[in-house]
Image (cartoon, grey):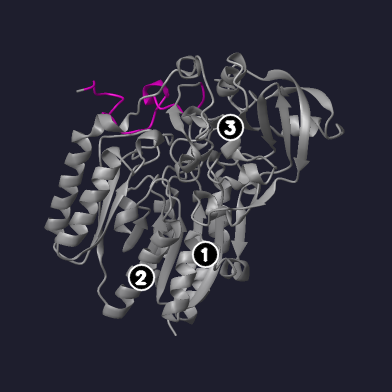
Amino acid sequence: MTRIFLAGIFHETHSFTDDRTGIDNFIIHRGQALLDRIGDGSQVDGFLTTAKREGWEVVPAATYLCGASGMVEHGVFEAFWDETRPVLVQAIAEGLDGIFLSLHGAMVTTELEDPDGELLTRIRAIPGAEKLPIFGVYDLHATLTEKMGELSEGLVCYRQCPHDDTYDSAVRAAELLARCLETGVWPRQHVRVTPIVWPPTGTGTRDGPMHALEEAARRIERDVPGVLAVNVVGGYSFADVRDAGVAFGIITEGDDAAAKAALDELAAIAWEMREGGIPREHELDEVLQGFVPNPEGPMLLVEPADNIGGGGPGDCTDVMRALLKHDVPGAGVVIADAAAVAALKHVPVGGRATLAIGGKGSRLDPGPVNLDVELISRSDGRFELEDDKSQIVVLGRTIDMGDAAVVRHRGLTILLTSRRLAPMDLGQWRSQGIDPEKLSAIGIKAAVGHRRAYDKIASSSFTVRTRGPCTSDLRRLPYKNIRRPVFPLDFLPG
């Protein structure tokens, strides 16, 4: 029976926040618990489902999984390697046919800029592993490096943002591994890192430069002989590492010169459309001046500067302040504030309390807002995803946002959570007894990933300029390590 080793480490590391990410922040699956993830809609599920169909025996090591946050303590990476290496060594000794990795690609540790490249380097250094094909899957917001391309045969990234294709991308990668094992032909990967870095708001694939690049990638896959997959990597602009930003990868069995020419074409398209990756943002006061609720659905106030999926604290207060200032009736916001939830512990439902809400997680925010609130409800914060294609399905179908409470101040409903949760599934609201479709306006702490869930219920949507660590104006960030020159840091518009 064909035997395939499975392991993975998944984190999107924000270099410009003050928090540090330790091992306690990671969800870890080992051995049988890893195999039991089949059916959960994740990357791992995509691989396991394909492995089952192919009749492979999967040798599970471990997967470490954490959402976006600050720099990862290097000990986390070493702990992952310490438990992964012996499983791999034993698997090789007993007979192994291939390796599959579940990755994010934008992880940074306190000692390593490219942990994914380092992981591949260490794997290849194990006797016997140099002769094994390595395939895997990673996020569109990764930092793709030449080392990652050189040390593996087929790493496949998501094609969609919002990430509706997490599962499907893993299936594509696993099917390429199956093809390699069946034909005995090992493909090569070529990587091109461009002099462009776009904020997450500029990496949506439904329009703009990323849409054009994805269309070009699919044409190249169709028209260039031997090309198996083309990866368009939007990059993660909040990782202050050399290769952060827009990159491309081609997996080919064909002519290397043709593959490199295709990379040249993609890089040229990206450069020509570079300004399209810098989105327009609206002023809150202009959007809310004279606000009138629309019966067709809520207005979305999208706040990328506090993008939870990009590493924001989820408690910045500008949108909440603006909704209160303009006395918007029937609006709602979600604020990640464990201290505020804890302060309500002894308040009965229907009771009142004065809370200092938000403003605790970023030095860029003006600070907490003191409000007299009524407690509407409380819960343990657990809910089932409404959408099994939600981007946060990587966390599983049962989501835990920590102890939660719903409070109300005048016309504003505030959902307080103890854990940050990217706003990518409407079940977050409905589980707390709130129908998001009946809210007049909703503050969204995201960049693009919310669109699958929220756009279908919205009457309008405005990306607004606020204070926070995930700013779309990258020139405001204190980069030290990114390659230079790079757009938009060093090139004037036009």
Instruction: Give the residue at the far bottom of this rendering.
Output: 1
Q: Earlier in the sequence, mark 1 or mark 3?
A: 1
Q: Earlier in the sequence, mark 2 or mark 3?
A: 2
Which residue is more in the foreground, 284 or 101?
A: 284
- Mark 2 = which residue? 175
Q: Position of residue 19 (x, y in %)?
A: 59, 33
Q: Is residue 481 magenta?
A: yes
- Mark 3 = which residue? 313
Type of secondary structure dominating the magenta stretch: loop
Which residue is more in the foreground, 336 or 177?
A: 336
Q: Position of residue 339 (x, y in %)?
A: 74, 31
Secondary structure beneath disc 2? helix
Is disc 2 surrounded by few (<14), some (14 to 19) or many (20+) residues within 10 Å? some
Q: Amino acid at mark 3?
A: Pro
Q: Amino acid at mark 1?
A: Arg
Q: Is residue 329 left or right of residue 402?
A: left
Secondary structure beneath disc 1? helix
